[in-house]
Amino acid sequence: MNAPSIDIMDMLLAESSFDLSLGTNLFIGKEKPHPDNITIIYDIAGGQPSLTMDKCNYERPAVQVKVRSRDYEDGFDLINRIYTSLHGRAHETWNGAIYELIIATSIPYHFDWDDNGRARFIINFNLQRKESADS
C-alpha cells in the first residue's frame, strides 16, 4: 500500500474545486518556500494496527494537512473545505487501500505565521484502512 499521504493527495486532487496541482501548490512531506499559497500533506504517527479474527490487518495511520496562505481568510477557507471533504469519508478504495473511515481529530486551526508573514493552518486526520482484496 502507498503512504497514506499519497492516497489523501489523490483524494484532494480529485476535488477540482481545490485547484491543487502536485509540485505546484500541493506537496508531500516538505514545506517549500515558494509559492506563498501551498498545501502540504505529512504522514504522522497514528494508532496501532489491529488484527481481526480472520487476520485482516487494519492500519490506523494519521496524516496532517497544512495550508499556508498569504491571505488569512483564503487559507482559513481552504483548510475548512479540506476538512469538510475528508472528515467522515468511509468505505472508499484508493490505490489498493480500502479506507473504512477518515476522521478529523479536531476542527482546523490557525497554527502560526511563518517568517514571511504567511498564515499556516493545520488539521490532523486519523485513518482506518486495510489492503484491498484486489491488490
Image (spheres, helix red, strand yellow):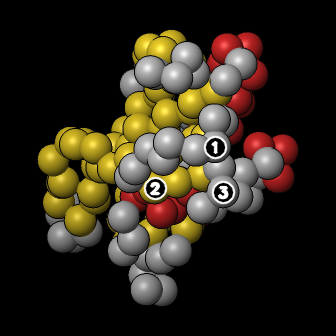
* Position of residue 100 measured from the top left corner of the image (x, y, whole percent): 46, 53
Of tags 3 and 2, which is closer to the observer? 3
Of tags 3 and 1, which is closer to the observer? 1
Of tags 1 and 2, which is closer to the observer? 1
What residue is pinned by disc 1?
35
Horizontally, residue 84 falls left or right of residue 18, namely left
What residue is pinned by disc 3?
24
Query: Disc 2 marks which amino acid?
Result: Ile
Quarter of the rendering occupied by the C terminus:
bottom left
For residue 126, which quarter of the picture? top left
Horizontally, residue 34 falls left or right of residue 74, namely left
* Position of residue 106 measured from the top left corner of the image (x, y, whole percent): 44, 18
Q: Residues within 10 Å of mark 2 (few under 14, many from 20)?
A: some
Residue shown at 52% from the left, 23% from the top = 116
Position of 91 relative to 101 (above/below): below
Position of 133 relative to 98 (above/below): below
From the viewer's side, name the closer residue of 47 and 9: 9
Q: Identify the element where label 1 is drawn.
A: loop
- Residues at marks 1 and 2, CA–CA distance in whole angstroms: 15 Å
Asked if the residue at tag 1 contacts the one at tag 3, i.e. Cβ–Cβ closer than 8 Å, the answer is yes
